[in-house]
Image: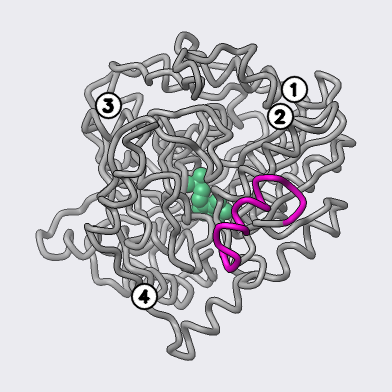
Amino acid sequence: MSTKQKRYFLTEEEIPTQWYNIQADMTTKPMPPLNPSTKEPLTVDDLAQIFPRECCVQELDTENAWIDIPEDVLEKYKFYRSTPLVRAYALEEALGTPAHIYFKNESVNPLGSHKINSALPQCYYAKQEGTENVTTETGAGQWGMALSYASKLYGLEAAVYQVKITMQQKPYRSTVMRTFGAAVTASPSMSTRAGKDIITRDPRHPGSLGTAISEAVELAQTTPNTKYTLGSVLNHVALHQSIIGLEAEKQMEKAGEYPDTVIACFGGGSNFGGLAFPFMRHNILDGKQTEFIAAEPASCPKLTRGQFRYDFGDEAGYTPLLPMFTLGHNFKPSNIHAGGLRYHGAGVIVSQLLKDGMMRGMDIPQLESFDAGMLFARTEGIVPAPESCHAIAATIREANRCKETGEEKVILFCLSGHGLIDMPSYEQYLNGDLQNYAITDEDVAKNLAELDNL
Ligand SMILES: *Cc1c(COP(=O)(O)O)cnc(C)c1O
């Protein structure tokens, strides 16, 4: 028998049947979302006007560490779970590093990213409470694809606002959404008041997750029997994604190792939280000293250069005020190809953990991310999503550091998605047409100053 096992799986019986809610174990609990006009903490009832009620209960749950995964969701998870934990021997060899590199491959499902892990429960809960329609935003389109498929499974109609610039960069994702039966609109659009306002202020606005969220929330609020769903940022999304880390924990055990460093790319925090939180619980409860790194684009650096404060989750200011590391909700991210990372703020839980020194951010320039994705593709045979390339770049930095120090660290990262529908981005990279986007301290400060009268 070979001693070099490449992939680790779980049997269906071994797939976790509960999600992990890190809020219950956090030393400092996250601060509550606030009503923007009264500045009062929001209750489940308030939030349930927009989101499926069960998601709101989960959002504010700081008591229960373990939440049962509904049986029906568990059945549907089995279409693609467990996902493999893979030892990246070829990448290690190419780097000449003594580090052991593992990745949790969330790209191996028909939708191509981790987003389906939360789309299924969100649609399940919406259906349970009698909702007929769901609305959402999508950046690069992975969440839109996942939500479109999940809503079809549960007999819901889906309306998706896709960021205009990414719809142009990744045209096939909207085709997949429409294949699943969703109605897709480029944001900012003329179909909502928020969209019209944004276009009036800036007729050539390329769109951002912030603009698309405003439009999707408005549509949900103005249409009967309709709930809004979000693919990242919120606590209940990170909760659903914890299936990633809980599986990885069991798989690492099969590999006979425990991670010294856990790395994921960072948009709003769902794949990071999903992989990291189950391991972080052992830092909190059992004195483990694993290091956690969230890799963000250098052009959208809310973790490394943002401020911790209350801010809106969207551009128009329709959402509750959330306590987060933010670049300001008016921040207009550069048109980088990692569309899923073009978001001005970080999730509430992650923001608190960052403030408490439980993790750190690492900013990665666009070209370095594609260099890393290229090496990964040529060694491990998987073309990674441009978002995931940031996690790979951070992993390579850490592995190279191990090469210098001789440390045999165990590094685990999340391959959040594949890049097979991101070919226009790879084409530009290969043709030498991609660039880095710098952002100045003045830009950051100016944008944040606009928040002072919130
Ligand atoms: C959406 C997305 C991300 C960023 O979102 P998070 O909530 O931060 O995980 C990262 N990678 C892929 C492949 C995505 O689709």
* C-beta proximity under 8 Å, tags 4 and 1: no
For the question of whether residue 41 can be seen, the reply is yes
4 vs 2, front mark = 4
Q: Which residues are magenta?
A: 190-205
Residue labelled 4 has its Cβ within 8 Å of some atom of ligand 1: no
Query: As displayed, is residue 49 above or below residue 333?
Result: above
Ranked by sequence position, the earlier of labels 3 and 1 is: 1
Instruction: Please report whichever mark, 2 or 3, sits nearer to the chain's N-terminal start.
Output: 2
Disc with the residue nearer the chain's start (4 vs 1): 1
Q: Contact, CB < 8 Å: mark 2 with mark 1?
A: yes
Q: Find numbered disc 3 in the image and state the secondary structure of the residue it sits on.
A: helix
Kindly state the secondary structure of the residue where label 2 is placed: helix
Mark on residue 71? Answer: 1
Q: Amino acid at mark 1?
A: Glu
Q: Quadrant of residue 442?
A: bottom left
Label 4: which secondary element: helix
Q: Decide if residue 251 is in sight here.
A: no
Q: Look at the image and say whether residue 191 sits in the magenta stretch.
A: yes
Residue hosting label 3:
283
Mark-to-mark CA distance, 4 and 1: 43 Å
Given contact means CB atoms under 8 Å apart, are the residues at marks 3 and 1 in contact? no
- Disc on res. 367: 4
**x%, y% of residue 27?**
28, 16
Which badge, 4 or 2, comes first in the chain's sequence? 2
Residue displayed at 53% across by 79% down: 426
Are the residues flagged by discs 3 and 4 in contact, CB closer than 8 Å? no
Determine the residue positioned at 58% across, 59% down: 207
Pointer 2: what residue?
74
Query: Which residue is found at the position 75% from the left and 62% from the top?
Result: 174
Q: Are the residues at dot 2 and dot 3 in contact (C-beta closer than 8 Å)?
A: no
